[in-house]
Amino acid sequence: MHRSPAAKNLCNQIFRYRSQLRPERIPPCDVFVNHRGIDTKRNVAGLLYDHLRRLRLRPFLDSKNMKPGDKLFEKIDPAIRNCKVGVAVFSPQYCDSYFCLHELALMMECKKRVIPIFCDVKPSELAVRDSMARIYPAKDMDKFRLALQEAKFTVGLTFDTVNGDWSEFLTSATEAVIKNIIEVEGDKMRSKRMNSWHQKNAMR
């Protein structure tokens, strides 16, 4: 897959920032890929994961980062809490999955920056299924509805897997991820500088 010069330049910015960090402060994953496996594991989500890995980033995709015997929530929830950016790949069967909606709701609760990708589905088609509401707790359904609503009102990408340009899509998605990582890490650096400034002034 062709790497765009813009993507490589953006990645270099991330690596320069990380060179200033102690190893224990580097997050275990940069981006969490939230997706419905039956729809997108072998195309959009899987290809995006591979594309990000080739750029030396650390994406998390359950089928790539987990092994038989791992507990789902014990691996997935910490990955979401520690990631820099989330990617939510919405697809026709996404809302049939409790796990997809749980991951999305947790990303929103953790105030993660989430990039929606509407793959073969319109934002207006995303809704919690009535069948799910009859099985799971009402409080979970409320969280899921709020998370979906927030995602619908977040600027994202759209892609048609039949007629879309795969190379263009992967380039756009990758650059969106990298730009958001840079912004998140930049915000953290500014926050640390501000806290340090306040501490120094408080000691005077």
Image (tube, helix red, strand yellow):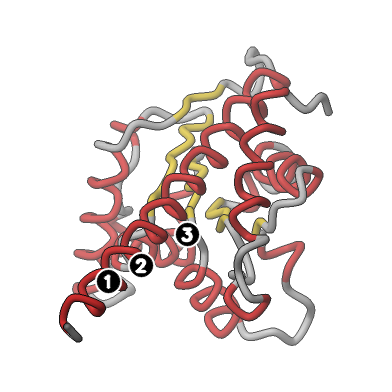
* Relative vertical location of residue 117 with respect to residue 29 in this rendering, above or below: above
**Residue that badge 1 annotates:** 195
Three-letter amino acid code at the position of disc 3: Cys
Query: For numbered disc 2, what is the local secondary structure?
Result: helix
Q: Quarter of the image holding residue 109?
A: bottom left
**Residue that badge 3 annotates:** 100
- Mark 2 vs 1: CB contact within 8 A: yes
**Residue that badge 2 annotates:** 192
Bin the neighbour count of mark 2 within 10 Å (Cα to Cα): few under 14, some 14-19, many 20 and up. few
Picture coordinates of residue 196, whole percent (x, y)? 31, 73
* Relative vertical location of residue 179 with respect to residue 65 in this rendering, above or below: above
Q: Which mark is residue 32?
A: none
Three-letter amino acid code at the position of disc 1: Asn
Distance Cα–Cα, label 1 vs label 3: 36 Å
**Which residue is depicted at the point 55% across and 51% down?**
35
Q: Quadrant of the C terminus?
A: bottom left
